[in-house]
Image (spheres, helix red, strand yellow):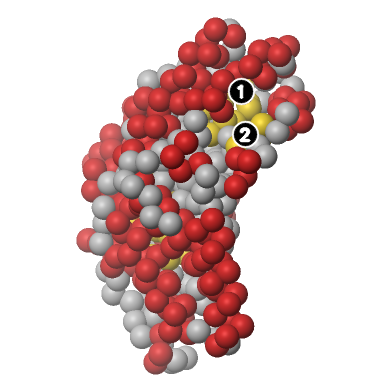
Amino acid sequence: MAVETGRVGAAVRGEFPIFESATYLNSCSQGALSHRVREAVEEWLSGWDANGAEWDFWVERNEAFRTAVAGLLHARADDVAVTTSVSQGVSALVSALPLDRERNRIVISEYEFPTVGQIAHAQELRGAEVVHVRPGPEGSIDADRFADAIDQRTALVCCTTVSYRSGHRHDVAAIAAAAHEAGALVLADSYQACGAVELDVGALGADAVTGGTVKYLLGTAGLGFMWVRPELRRSLLPTQTGWFADEDIFAMSIADYSPHASARRFDSGTPPVPALYAGVAGLEVLAATGVPAVEAHVSSLVDRLLDGLDELGAAVATPREPAARGPLVCIRSTDVPSLVAALAAERIVTSMRDESLRVAFHLYNVEDDVDRLLDALGRHRALLA
Ligand SMILES: Cc1ncc(COP(=O)(O)O)c(C=O)c1O
């Protein structure tokens, strides 16, 4: 099912059956299922039926995923850990930080996903102090706000690339510059960006970049990744670990701890095999279009939506400038559960966070999806703030 590079919208939509019955605008929660990903999961089941444990093929899928993520991030496979979730990767990373008396602070943005905040606060049991960076009056958290919160005691700064709850995009490079000046590491959880926003880890400037396959990478749950800056690796010894992180998993040793020299030291136990089949296939679908083409397409749909929302006089939490947003638009509502339900009754699939309706676009969305949503929002205008 090869698709030409750059094909978006109507040209790829037929590969995603959900559009036969719904206007799907919820890729910030879960990407739509493609024929290719379904086939890949079926291949996993068929192989299991035919051969039982396909150990070699599982390991090959794990490495195929690592390599595909490296391509996505403009990185080397050796610098990518395959994780079962963002939580697992971040926990392994944080477990490698000494958090001693000189450097015990973790700075987190108010826009982090709960797992990052909860892992940070869990380190209070190890003597950490967690500092929250809050948004300014207009809702964004600019690099200066982070710089004010960072000092010589800061061990780690967490600045999600795109906020799951407001759609803001952080200036990760500027935040990383402030953190590095103070000797702190930077984690950019990029789950709401990867696959819909072109990410080059070199330019991004963070020391660790996380994401997963459930959303814009078009796979399923149970699989994620963490890129770690290679120069740092040797000094990071995760105490949250597992046998797939060992320098030689087949040594089967219970006598020592010898983490792999590559970013594989942040891997854990048996790889999530079904999710790997789906994850590799999802990345193939995405690579056939190319993230730059997805990003340009999504940005034009966001522009169209923002223009229409202006006409409705709606309040939007997400900033307008393209550099300050991603594929997610958050629209303020007076009663967001009722609004999501009213749209769902018309087979328009969205989601909610805080008091906002969340609308997210991907390669398969078309202008008609935007117009259908705007038409429905016009009829439910009373539910918009
Ligand atoms: C920004 C962000 N980070 C992390 C996650 C999920 O983390 P995990 O893979 O640990 O479930 C999500 C969504 O589920 C997210 O939106």
Q: Are marks 1 and 2 in contact (CB under 8 Å)?
A: yes
Residue at image point 54% right, 7% down:
311
**Where does the N terminus fall, quadrant-wise?**
bottom left
Residue at image point 43% right, 92% down:
253
Locate residue 250, reporting x and y percent.
40, 90
Residue at image point 52% right, 10% down:
310
Q: Secondary structure at mark 1?
A: helix
Q: CA distance from mark 1 to mark 2?
A: 8 Å
- Crowd around label 2: few <14 · some 14–19 · many ≥20 (10 Å): many
Q: Is residue 188 above or below residue 40?
A: above
Locate residue 160, reporting x and y percent.
44, 41
Residue type pointed to by label 1: Arg
Locate residue 147, reporting x and y percent.
33, 33
Residue type pointed to by label 2: Thr
- Find residue 363 and report its image quarter: top left
Residue with the mark numbered 1: 372
Residue at image point 56% right, 67% down:
41
Disc 1 under 8 Å from ligand 1? The reply is no
Q: Is residue 113 above or below residue 287?
A: above
Q: Is residue 285 above or below residue 67?
A: above
Residue with the mark numbered 2: 23
